[in-house]
Image: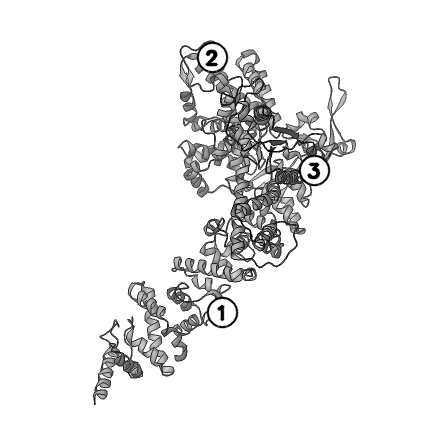
Amino acid sequence: LRTLQENGTVYSAGPEAARRPLAQVHKLHEAGPRKWVAFCDPEAAKRLVDQEAVQVSNVTLCFSSSLITYTATCHPLSEEFMERVARSAHSMKLEERTRQWTDWIRSVDDVWEMEWKLIHGSPGIGKTYKFDEEIVPALRAYPQVNTAIIDGSSDKLVKFSLLDVLSEVALPQGSSGASSGGAFPEAPGKSARRGKSEDGAAMAAKEPITLVVLDEYHMMPDSQKQQLVKWYSRVSRATGKRVKLVMIANRIDIDDRDLIEMVITDLEMEKYIAEKGIRDSETRTMVSKVIHLQGKDVETETLVVTDEAREHCREIQKRIKAVLDENILFCRRGFEAHCAANKHIRAVAKSAGVEQNDTPEEVQQKCYLRYFKLWLVSSRNLFGEDMMTFRLNDRLLECFRQIEEQGTREEGIANLAGILKKKMPSLPTSFCRAYCGHIANVLMQERRQLLAGPVQFQDLDAQYSEDRLERLPDALSLVVYASLLNINDQDNYTYPDFSLKKIPNSFLYHPAHKLLAWIHYMSSLVGRPLSSSSVTGVLATLMRTRMRDLPSRFPQWFLDPTQDDRSGPPGHGRTCEVICVPGDPRDLEWVTEKLKRGFSIDWDNAHATYCRHNITNVRLFKDVVYHSEGIVLHYVPWDNIVSLMEIDEEEIFSGRVQAANSLAESVCRHMQPPRREEEAQHNHPYNIALWMLYRRGFSDEVKVEWLQERCTFEFFLWASLFAHKYMSHPDQASFERSLSQRLIGLSEENLASDSIETLWSHTFAHLMKLGKGSLSYRVALKVTQKYYPPLSEWDDKIQTLCQLLHGHCTPDKLDLLTGDEYFWEQLQELGQQGSGAQRAAVERVSLQMFRVSDKGELSERSQAALLSRPLSLPPGLPAGYAYKLERGIKRLRGEGVEVAAGWDRKEDPLYRELKQVEANLFLSQDD
């Protein structure tokens, strides 16, 4: 190691024992017991990079271009998760419309009708080809149309500013009238898409436009992206939206959406104001200010916003979101579209199989069709959407031809492995060769079936759905089998996407467990989820292969033929090596850049760093959360995450900064709510994030359903205990009114809960008000039975009810309840229809109302109410209470109301004594 470090070079012995430099050493890293040698030139070190490790002087050396590993502790996947996968596999699908991304532009009319598009997807799926070879050539037939194609990765943008390049774009001059229908006209060497061209008059009738296509958008720095969208906003407004912009990227991030949103906000607001005919200058100014407060560069000011302006702002925000969703298109291609665009097999792409009268040339083409399909389906499912590229068609065909010939088969497999290795550099060459050898065997087996005679493709597809798990000899055969299980499904999740997006906290699991979950998912799609015995067998087979995890890619496999097939890797799944990039995790921009490229960092080292050094930049941190699929949230202390969500609190309420709001949404998406009450700590990031989102978005119609689904009774119990410092709101009255209604609804739904008094006895105590349209007495009875003394924040009626139940009510306080008609309605309902506990509570209330008379004379109104209402009474009430109700009896006699007519215990001494007192009073009045 010292020699390597001093000399900076790795040497290899030549044929004459002469040493020659193999690669320049960049750095040495220590990762547990291993030493990593990182090279400056990875191409020159390929032979070493592909080795798992070598022993030099009793030291284990690993080789890499820029990567190291760390040892992660792994958890087993739960049976509950596996059952959920089996139940919901068919709903775990990618969106259909993303595969049909070309639908939005099928004719020339679509170009005139669009304003802008941001198209992003894997390289090589035809995004640029669509415009360079189809749309732009067709538009050049229109003399009034200007087109410009700008390469965002060009050296020209290094020498010149983007604005200089954009200044050369010819803008549309004047207008030739309204847009009319039509199809793509014939371009030189091409036929029209609809089989006919428009006449000159119809073409001339279309208004002049300019189409700007910005390719390789993802390669541009943020400053140039800002210049582009601001330029578009300016010229679009100046030309009446006759400049059309299409941005093409291999990938985008959350900042790209935010940047575009910032620019189109003005355009959509102007369009809305014009459509609604808002002429009042004060309303227009108010709407403009509120909308612009969504930006970052507007000074905070106090606004008095009218209900009308607030409604306009909500509608504009809805439109902005809809416009972004409609015009930012994620693109992918299924194998059907791929085969239809492949010049080598286009002629037979629609074939159903090999027919009896097919010529040898047609049979050969159909063999190629099947080769492409099998390769595309298997490689996509295992390695991701990047394998669905058009650029490799010629090279793939050459490999297939070599594989067909016995003498060149090994060369063809090696060339195919080279293609895979170049596309997926993280895969060891030995694995690429072994995988391509398996695929070659599958191709040759199909070739024999196709050459044997008439056969239908659907019959060939069916053989891949057969249950062969028990007969597969090794892990590689297992994953190849799983990759072809659902061969005609173009919308299932690939392994990398399933691992990142469908396995919660996927970084916690061994890659063998994640592969097991994906195989279970693929088996469930064909109606055969893995049984418990199959799960055990598949996992045992996978664990016999040594793997290194790449969280966003297929893991590195090291297929060592000398390894004992019966022994698993060290730790047997309790730990695994994770490939990562060495660096300083405090540099959040560097972390984001590595995550964008599909690499990981050393999360254990990051956790130790973040415990010592707090993260303070919420904008950069939310980008790390977004690109790590929430992994980073589990390695940052909770208090730090909470402080980041609070950091822009005041500014968020004025609408200036949205970074903390975005971070809160990411926390709710990637973290799990506490499952047990003891886990719901005061600083739990999930609950704090959800509470902040609820508080900010309680009136947002777009988010209300999402919030109601997550804001459960248990969540509000936590909020009652710990959300006291997050209760302030600019529109306090509306917020508390909405919160109160939500709490009332949850209280009614969870009346049987033993924790309901917790909901109303802490932070939300001041919202507890009784009456119709507010909290019911049945909830109040449940709360006040368990809580004493009453809280000063409670409504006066609730305090009185609590004092009454616990025997401390006075006659003047009781008047608050006896004068409330809703109080008597609720007592009657609970006494007649309530549960046993509710009837017991009603009887206790009735008893305590009589006992209040021992502390002083009840008012005439209270006496009359007691005697005239239907009451559920406890047995054995003393008859002496009858003499304390004489004023009430006299009042009822004067009103002609029968005394105690609605009581349920007319056989008790109290009832008989009341009737005797009533009779005596009648006799004395008659005398």
User: Which residue is outermost to the right?
Assistant: 6
Asked where in the image residue 652 lies, by quadrant, the reply is bottom right
Under circle 2, the secondary element is: helix
Location of the C terminus (image quadrant): bottom left
Could you tell which of marks 3 and 2 lies nearer the N-terminus?
3
- Which sits in the foreground, 711 or 322? 322
* Disc number for residue 29: 3
Residue depicted at x 66% and y 54%: 299
Q: Of the residues tagged 3 and 2, which is closer to the observer?
A: 2
**Which residue is found at the position 41% from the left and 22% from the top?**
458
Please tell me which of labels 2 and 1 falls first in the chain.
2
**Image quarter (top left, top right, bottom left or bottom right) of the N terminus:** top right
Mark-to-mark CA distance, 3 and 2: 57 Å
Is 209 placed above or below 860 here?
A: above
Q: Residues within 10 Å of mark 3 (few under 14, many from 20)?
A: some
Q: How many marks?
A: 3
Residue 569 x, y percent position in the rendering: 56, 34
| Amino acid residing under circle 3 | His
Q: Amino acid at mark 2?
A: Glu
Cα separation, mark 3 vs mark 1, equals 62 Å
Give the left or right position of residue 485, taking residue 392 as reference: left
Quarter of the image where one finds residue 44: top right
Q: Amino acid at mark 1?
A: Glu
Q: Position of residue 678 (x, y in %)?
A: 50, 56
Q: Nearer the viewer, mark 3 or mark 1?
A: 1
| Numbered tag placed on residue 707 in the rendering | none
- Return the residue at label 2: 362
Residue 793's label in the rendered image is 1
